Structure formats: C-alpha cells, structure tokens
Image (spheres, rainbow, N blue to C red):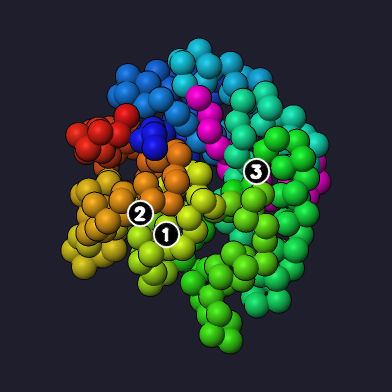
Amino acid sequence: MSKILGAQLYTIRNFAATPEELDQSLSRIKAMGYRTVQVSAMWHLSVDEIAAIVASHGLQTVITHTPYERFIDDLDGVIRDHHKLGCSLAGLGGLPKKYQSKDGYYAFAKKFSTIADELAQNGLKFSYHNHHFEFQKYGGQLGLDILIEQTNPDSFLFTLDTYWVQVGGGNPSNWIRKLKNRIEAIHLKDLAIIDSQQIMAEVMEGNLDWPEILQACEEAGVKWYLIERDDGPTDAFDSLKISYDHLRKLGYE
C-alpha cells in the first residue's frame, strides 16, 4: 500500500489570498517534499487558477473540501470542477448545524446518499470529514454511526480526522479499522496539552498513539495521508514541515 503524504491546504489558508500567494505557498510545500494536496478554503480563486498552479508545481489534488451549498445548488459544477482538478474525492468539511440532531443525521444521510450516488455515476466519490460533535449519542447511537449505517459504502466515504476523533472520546485506530475500505484520505493531526490547555499539534508532537494509528491506516486501505493543522502556536509552514519530517523517517513520502 502506498504511503503518500499530502498537505491539507486549509493549514495555509491565510497565505493563499491571491493566485500569486498560492503559487508561493505551493512552492514552499513542494520544497518540503509533499506530493499531493487537498484543496480547501481556496474557492475565492477560480478552479482553473487552482488547477494550473497546483499542476505547475508537480503536485496532485487528491481531495477537496467543497462548500455544502455547492453540493445542493450546483452539483454539475462540482463534478466539472473535480474533473478539472483531476481529483476523484469530493469532500465536505462538516455537518451543517441544522442537521445536528438524530432526525438531522438521518435526513443528511438520505440527501447525501443521493448526491454520492450521482457523483459515483460521474467517476467521483463523496467523502465526509468528521469533527467531535458526531460522537454525541442519540438514544445510545452515535451520530457518526448513523451516517455509516445509512449510506452506501461504495460511494459515501469518510475523511477521518485523528484529532477530532480523540476529542470526541473515540479511539482513532478503532474507528479507522471500523471504516475499512471507506477511508481513501485521512487527516493526520496530533493532540497535545500545554499549560492545561488542549491544542492541535504536529504529528508525533502530542499524545496520540501513532504506531497504532498508522498500522490501522494500512489495514484499512488508506491511500492519501493528509497533514493538517487548523491552528496552533507553530507557524503553518513550519507545522507542515515538522509533521512531514516525522513521517518521512517512517517511510512515508
């Protein structure tokens, strides 16, 4: 199984306000050794600009985070944009607040099952990114379990986020194994405690069990290992490099 590292561009969202800034940022990311990226928080730029800049650095877009409204109002455009990017995974960054109830999870699963199936008919797959709120129980059942059970495993995938699983009280390794063959892309970020505060940290700089997580990823068939750091005390580019360097020593590239 390949061990290809990618940069979740949400990490450097504050350094991509213009095509020129994105170009400079991707130059730095490529120089670190990254081979793939996730396009997220970049939609103020045109998809043609994004695709051209990514390609100019020899990088591959493997997944996006696409706004919820576009899936609802412009699915044809979403399909077209992903084909332009050469990207097969259309991701959603989280569950809108209006769906965060027991009935809401069922409604979302039904609506996005239809969307996922249409994406599949056009050579794409849908991938849902979790946070911590999906670990709330409704009558003893987790919101995340409702999404898993009520959707098509062939077209509705999950971009599991190691940090948010841990925050939600779950064991990242167990959830990775539970979603075997439904995780093509995963978000890797660590969790640390500094001055009694919980923070996001670079991979292997916090308290998560990385040997077990990475073993579970291999068993589950993960293809794309995407490094992300939403916020924290470390410079965004330094953060991406620290995580990359740690994983590179283990044979990831």
The span picked out in magenta is 60-74
Check residue 67 for magenta coloring. yes
Q: Earlier in the sequence, mark 1 or mark 3?
A: 3
Amino acid at dot 3: Lys
Whole-percent x, y for residue 161 in the image:
43, 54
Q: Residues within 10 Å of mark 2 (few under 14, many from 20)?
A: many
Which image quadrant: the C terminus?
top left
- Residue holding disc 3: 125
Q: Earlier in the sequence, mark 3 or mark 2?
A: 3
- Residue holding disc 2: 216
Position of residue 22 in the picture relative to residue 172 (left or right): right
Q: Tell me the element at label 1.
A: helix
Amino acid at dot 2: Ala
160, above or below 64, in the image: below
The reply to whether callout 2 and callout 1 are in contact (CB within 8 Å) is yes
Whole-percent x, y for residue 28 in the image:
35, 21
Q: Quadrant of residue 229?
A: top left
Q: Quadrant of residue 111?
A: bottom right
Front tag of 1 and 3? 1
26, above or below 63, in the image: above
Mark pair 2, 1: CA separation? 6 Å
Position of residue 97 in the picture relative to residue 211 (left or right): right
Q: Earlier in the sequence, mark 2 or mark 1?
A: 1
Q: Tell me the element at label 2.
A: helix
